[in-house]
Image (cartoon, helix red, strand yellow):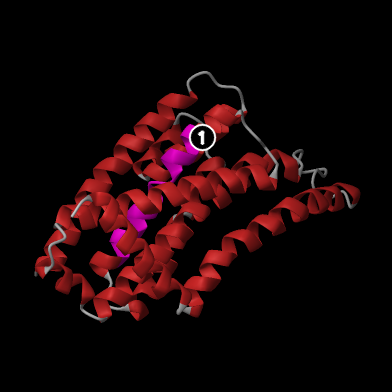
């Protein structure tokens, strides 16, 4: 059985799981909802705050528009990819509850193919989602060719999140708890924005931050934006390899 056949069967199975689960359906459409809110809400809120002398004001010299790179990178590059990972992760938890994951071990489908599917498909979908989100919101845009690479780097959060939930959550109830934790950890990116360099680079211990940092640097026209991106991708791939190892142990246990 080749990878193409395996992917087709797995996609069909995941689609059926998503379509019958109202939470997963909501999470899928939430990407669209939040993108619409940001596309029309950000300019309106910026104009409103300026008109009311709230941002900028006597004590704060920056307007909301100065924070657009932070908001876009967080909502699209982190949250957008994370939502895709959550959808696939909870679909895996459904399979875990039904013992489908363990049952797959006795099928002709090699475990390697299963893992590759869990990495490649969420990454491709997350890349498209991040890219589309940034373009649709239409604020703090960077050159398209840079956006393609940054979207691909950001998309690695999706398989990491999916495997994290599938490995450490025993069921969907625990999955919800972990989802809240992962969402809170993402605020590291927002915190890092307000820290000056070189101290800001310490937040690179949380690899998704480096993807957002690459976005900020690309928006500012910094020539070395790709260094932050490459380091972020390498660190995320290391984490992904570790998660695959833990996932394999959890499945065979």
Q: Quadrant of residue 145?
A: top right
- Report the side of 128 relative to 201 (left or right): right
Which image quarter holds the C terminus?
Answer: bottom left
Tag 1 secondary structure: helix
Q: Nearer the viewer, residue 186 or 25?
A: 25
Picture residue at 55% right of the left edge, 72% below the top:
26
> Residue 171 at what x, y percent from top left?
30, 78
Q: Nearer the viewer, residue 62 or 36?
A: 36
Give the residue number, with chain letter if any, for mark 1.
Answer: 148
> Residue 175 at what x, y percent from top left?
35, 73
> Residue 139 at what x, y percent from top left?
70, 41
Residue 219 visible: yes
Specify the segment rendered in magenta: 148-165
- Report the side of 32 relative to 27 (left or right): right
Which secondary structure dominates the residues rendered in magenta?
Answer: helix
Badge count: 1
Up the image or down, 88 lies above or below 137; here it is: below
> Residue 68 at what x, y percent from top left?
67, 42
Picture residue at 60% right of the left edge, 22% below the top:
221
Which image quarter holds the N terminus?
Answer: bottom left
Q: Is residue 153 magenta?
A: yes
Q: Nearer the viewer, residue 91 or 158?
A: 91
Q: Residues within 10 Å of mark 1 (few under 14, many from 20)?
A: some
Picture residue at 37% right of the left edge, 30% below the top:
230
Up the image or down, 179 lies above or below 98; here it is: above
């Amino acid at each position: 059985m080749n990878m193409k056949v395996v992917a087709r069967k797995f996609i069909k199975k995941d689609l059926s799981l998503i379509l019958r689960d109202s939470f997963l359906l909501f999470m899928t459409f939430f990407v669209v909802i939040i993108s619409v809110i940001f596309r029309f809400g950000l300019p309106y809120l910026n104009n409103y705050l300026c008109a009311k002398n709230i941002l900028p004001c006597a004590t704060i010299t920056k307007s909301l528009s100065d924070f657009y790179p932070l908001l876009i990178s967080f909502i699209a590059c982190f949250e957008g990819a994370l939502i895709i990972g959550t959808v696939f992760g909870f679909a895996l938890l459904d399979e875990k509850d039904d013992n489908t994951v363990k049952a797959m071990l006795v099928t002709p489908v090699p475990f390697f193919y299963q893992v590759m599917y869990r990495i490649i498909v969420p990454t491709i979908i997350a890349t498209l989602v991040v890219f589309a989100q940034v373009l649709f919101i239409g604020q703090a845009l960077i050159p398209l060719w840079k956006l393609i690479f940054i979207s691909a780097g950001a998309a690695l959060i999706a398989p990491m999140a999916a495997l994290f939930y599938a490995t450490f959550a025993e069921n969907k109830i625990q999955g919800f708890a972990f989802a809240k934790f992962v969402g809170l950890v993402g605020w590291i990116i927002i915190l890092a924005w307000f820290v000056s360099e070189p101290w800001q680079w310490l937040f690179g211990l949380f690899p998704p931050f480096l993807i957002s940092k690459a976005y900020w640097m690309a928006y500012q026209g910094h020539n070395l934006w790709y260094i932050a991106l490459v380091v972020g991708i390498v660190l995320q791939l290391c984490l992904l390899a570790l998660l695959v190892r833990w996932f394999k142990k959890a499945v065979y246990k």
